[in-house]
Amino acid sequence: MLADLVAGALEDAAERQKSRGLDQVEAAALAAPPALDALSFLAPADRVKIIAEVKRASPSRGALATIADPAALAARYAAGGASAISVLTEQRKFQGSLADLEAVRAAVDVPVLRKDFIATDYQVLEARAAGADLVLLIVAALDQPTLTHLHALITELGMTPLVETHDAVEVSRAVDLGARLVGVNARNLSTFELDRDLFGRLADRIPSGTIKVAESAVSTAGDVDHYRSSGADVVLVGEALVTGDDPVATLKEFLSV
Ligand SMILES: O=P(O)(O)OC[C@@H](O)[C@@H](O)c1c[nH]c2ccccc12
């Protein structure tokens, strides 16, 4: 369940905070090289754009892939034409880490997203200190004051929030924030059910001028085409890339729709 994922991520962050305090992480965040302007990399274009994800496992699918070298995988994603790289940093169910994010950051010139269950300033500062350019905010996991606060903090640090939604109420909450980058996750993070048509049903509620991201459930180029024809500017793909033999070829195929 989403609440358990958030609680676990917060426990892990509290553990890290014992050895690296808030002040230290804040200093590292402020000293890091500036974030890339993710909005320009992801701006709507005459072709679909892809955020390619480094994902070892998930609570719904279990182990997906042995990724010994996340930096090498991310470099292949970039070579295949990915406009940004998503790195799962959640440890318990996704087997990720901030070390993965740091390694990816050093290997590519495109923006890097910290994909985790973010609910505190500490986690946002850690993301920036590790070199993240984008941070995921899951609307369903946060009350509106916290969402507003974290959205502002991410922006102040020069990063771009990717605001993830799963229903019409969440989309209006994202719009109220003034979010420039809004995602619709086909997977319900409480039941793990997939709905490939959800993006198409919600897309019209996202104002023009906002970059629209369709997240999850892409296994074929036909799925990318489906999202694109429903109005997606960007598609976020994980499993299909980590489980296939040739991510460069898969990305090229997906980008040609
Ligand atoms: O592996 P998929 O179905 O291509 O999905 C990727 C990505 O959308 C998914 O990992 C994801 C979307 N939102 C999340 C929030 C937390 C963890 C993971 C996710």
Image (spheres, helix red, strand yellow):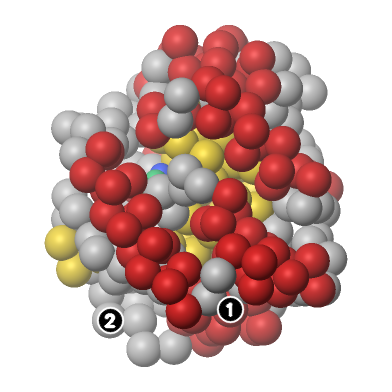
At a point 79% along the width and 66% down the height, the residue shown is 30
Report crowding for label 1: few under 14, some 14 to 19, many 20 or more residues within 10 A (C-alpha).
Answer: some
Q: Is residue 38 rendered to the left or right of residue 225?
A: right
Q: Residue at the spot x=18%, y=68% of the render?
A: 63
User: Is the CB atom of the residue marked by disc 2 within 8 angstroms of ligand 1's nearest atom?
Assistant: no
Tell which of 124 and 90 is nearer to you.
Answer: 124
| Above-or-below relation of 189 to 87 | above
Residue 111 % position (x, y): 70, 62
Residue 134 falls left or right of residue 203: right
Question: Could you tell me which secondary element the residue under label 2 belongs to?
Answer: loop
The image shows residue 77, relative to residue 182, as above or below, that is below
- Which quadrant of the figure has residue 103? bottom right
Residue under the image location 27 percent in, 74 percent down? 65
Residue 102 got which mark? 1
Measuring from the top left, give residue 88's x and y in whole percent. Answer: 42, 62
The quadrant of the picture occupied by the C terminus is top right
Residue 16 can be seen, yes or no:
yes
> What amino acid type is highlighted by mark number 1?
Glu
Foreground of the two, 25 or 107: 25
Dot 1: element: helix
Q: Relative to residue 52, is residue 1 drawn left or right?
A: left
Mark positioned earlier in the residue sequence (2 or 1): 2
Pointer 2 residue: 66
For the point 48% across and 55% down, the residue is 115
Regarding residue 242, the answer to whether it shows in the image is no
Q: Quadrant of the N terminus?
A: top left
Disc 2 residue type (three-letter)? Thr
Q: CA distance from mark 2 to mark 1?
A: 18 Å
- Mark 2, mark 1: which one is toward the viewer? 1
